Image (tube, coloured by chain):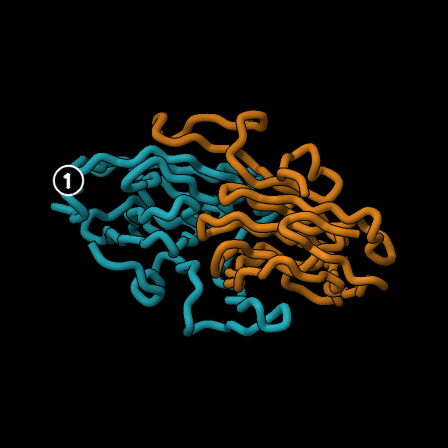
Chain colours: A orange, B cyan
Amino acid sequence: MEPLTAGAFAPFGQVIEAGQLGCHYPINGGSCVRYHDLARLDPGFGGELIASVFRAQPTALPRSVAQFERHPLASQAFIPLSGRPFLVLVAPPAPRPDPQSLRLFLADASQGVNLDRAVWHHALLALEGVSDFLVLDRKGPGANYDEAWLDQPLWLDALEVVR
Amino acid sequence: MEPLTAGAFAPFGQVIEAGQLGCHYPINGGSCVRYHDLARLDPGFGGELIASVFRAQPTALPRSVAQFERHPLASQAFIPLSGRPFLVLVAPPAPRPDPQSLRLFLADASQGVNLDRAVWHHALLALEGVSDFLVLDRKGPGANYDEAWLDQPLWLDALEVVR
C-alpha cells in the first residue's frame, strides 16, 4: 500500500485535489482559490460526461479480491464526499489485469482519482463507514464495461496486498 | 432563504445529491448504490467539461451583495467537499439579474448544485469555515463570463435577503 500522490498515480490517471504544484490562482476578489483543470476527463467518442453519486458500504478487511473491471471507452472519476479515506486498487491497461502489476493506493478524504480509460480497477473500497462519492463517467453508445477475474484471488490484509 | 430542493431549484439547474426519487440501483454486487446522472452537465458548443477545486473563504454575515456573474456558454456545478453547508444566491436568465427574482437557497453539506447556462449567481458563499468545492465547468473558446451589478446592493442578513 502506498500513499496517493500525483506522480505515483500517473500511470493510471490523475489525483483530483487542491495541490500547490498545479495551476491555481485567486478568483472572486481573492476570497477563493481555483485549482484548475485537475483531470483528463474523457467521455470518449460520441459520449458525454455525467455526474452520479455512489453510496458505498465500507469494505471489511482483511478480504480477498479477485474481480476487476475496466471501462475501455472513457475515463471514470471518483471524488469522496463523506470525509473518509478509501482504497484504490488498480492495474495498468492490458488484456487482463496482471497480478504482479497491481498497485494499492490509500486516498485520503481530500483526494479524488480519475482513472484513464481501460485502467483495470477494483470496485470501490470505502473505509470506515458508508461513504458517498461523486462519480464522473460516460453516457453514450457502446460497451464500456469489461470484467476479469484473477486466476488466484489476492488477500487484502489490513491495507496491504498479499500476493 | 429556503432549503435546497430539486423542485424549488429547477428554474436554475439541478441538485446533485443521493436522493430516493431519481434513478438509482445497486452495483458492485450490492455493496454500492448508484444515484445515476444527476445533472445536465453542459459544456456548450466546442467546449469540454473540466474538474477543478475551489477553496473558498467563509463569508461573513451580515454582508451586502451587489455583484453577480453568469456563464452564457455552459453549465457550472459546485459540489461541497468539506462537509459544510453553503449558500446559493441565484436569479433567472435575463439581460441583468432582477433583484425581485433573486432566490437564496441553503445547501446542506451533502448537496451540490449544477447551474444551467446563463443563470445569474453570486460568487461562492461558503459557511462555517474554509470550504473546498469540486467545480465542473467549461474549457473552450469564447467569452463565458459576464458580470453585472445591482443598482442597489442587497443586504444578506443572517441567511435572509433583505430587499
Residue B58, percent from left and from top: 30, 36
Q: Is residue A48 visible?
A: no
> Residue shown at 27%/53% (left/top)?
B106
B129 vs A154, left or right, is left
Crowding near the residue tagged with mark 1, few <14, some 14–19, many ≥20 C-alpha atoms within 10 Å: some
> Residue shown at 46%/51% (left/top)?
A81
Q: Is residue B106 above or below residue B57?
A: below
Q: Amino acid at mark 1?
A: Trp
A48 vs B101, left or right, is right
Q: Is residue A36 above or below residue A44?
A: above
| Snapshot quadrant of residue A60 | bottom right
| Snapshot quadrant of residue B67 | top left
> Residue shown at 41%/29% (left/top)?
A27
Chain letter belonging to callout 1? B
- So how many labels did they put on this image? 1
Q: Is residue A20 above or below residue A4?
A: above
Residue A104, percent from left and from top: 69, 47
Q: Is residue A22 above or below residue A89?
A: above
Q: Regarding mark 1 in the picture, which secondary structure is present there?
A: strand
Q: Quadrant of the N terminus of chain B?
A: bottom left
> Residue shown at 29%/47% (left/top)?
B87
Depth check: give the residue in front, A136 or B10: A136
Depth check: give the residue in front, A150 or A146: A150
Q: Which residue is mark 1?
A: B155
Q: Is residue B18 visible?
A: yes
Residue B128, percent from left and from top: 27, 40
